[in-house]
Amino acid sequence: MESLFEFLSDKWWLIFPLSAFAGHWANSWRKAGERRHRRKVELYTLRNQSRDAEVASAARVADVLVRHTATNARWLEYELDVGKLIDFPLMTDVREPLTVAFLRAKREADGQRPTTAADMTSPAAFESYRQAVDSFALALDLAEREAKRIKDSRFSGPERQRLATARKLLRIAEDSAATPAERQQAYKRARRELDGLIVLPDVTIAALEAKAAPGLAAGATHPDGHTGQPRETTA
């Protein structure tokens, strides 16, 4: 021990480089710790941003799904209500360009619709779907506006009288106070009045039969004797 002190007493100048080395080492260790801390913070931030992006993306898809469902519901109001189709026959007239455009836009949007929001993970697929739903909603707006503007003006006087008669018959066919025989007879007469004037989609016929004549089988023989969907409107 005494010899160590003698050595140090002669080498007192070593204190300065040793102190500098110790200070440099401590500074390096501190900086390394700071770098590790920054990396942890960055990783934590990236994970949170990734989770937030996933949530935001899922929410955007969900918003488009809601708009898609709402637009389909607007069209379904026509499909399930023969009265609305009588009032606005253009909505099923496949010779009308706006109606054709709307039906094509609907098929395009329906074809891209995911089962759930979580199923759509591709940004490109989402953008394509969003645009398809926007086009679908716009096409329906245009077709609906034109149908409400024209109404039944393209029909002749006798044809409009047939439409008015069909409206009255349908009210009887859907009247629960009427007897089953009266309701079925009114339904068949209404179908005859509409035949050749308005195209009734299969789902419309099924909904009408369920309300007006529940005893009729879907796809039953048409009042004229043929089966299937009525002929296209002659408007």
Image (cartoon, rainbow, N blue to C red):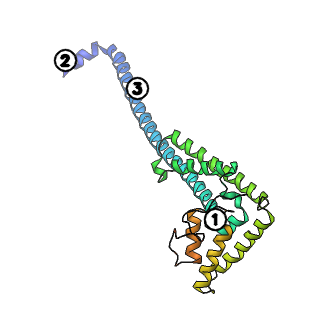
Tell me if residue 82 comes above or below residue 18 in the rendering: below
In the rendered structure, the answer to whether residue 12 lies left or right of residue 160 reads left
Q: Are marks 3 and 2 in contact (CB under 8 Å)?
A: no
Q: Is residue 70 above or below residue 33?
A: below
What secondary structure is found at the residue carrying circle 3?
helix
Q: Which residue is mark 1?
A: 77
Task: Left or right? Give the position of 45 relative to 189.
Answer: left
Mark 1: secondary structure: helix
Residue flagged by tag 3: what amino acid is it?
Asn
The percent position of residue 9, horizontal first and vertical second, equals 28, 16
Q: Which residue is mark 2?
A: 3
Which quadrant would the N terminus be assigned to in this image? top left
- In the image, residue 149 lies at what x, y percent? 79, 57
Element at label 2: helix
Query: Viewer-proximal residue, 217 or 221?
Result: 221
Which label lies toward us, 1 or 2? 1
Q: Residue at x 65, y 49 (%)?
A: 100
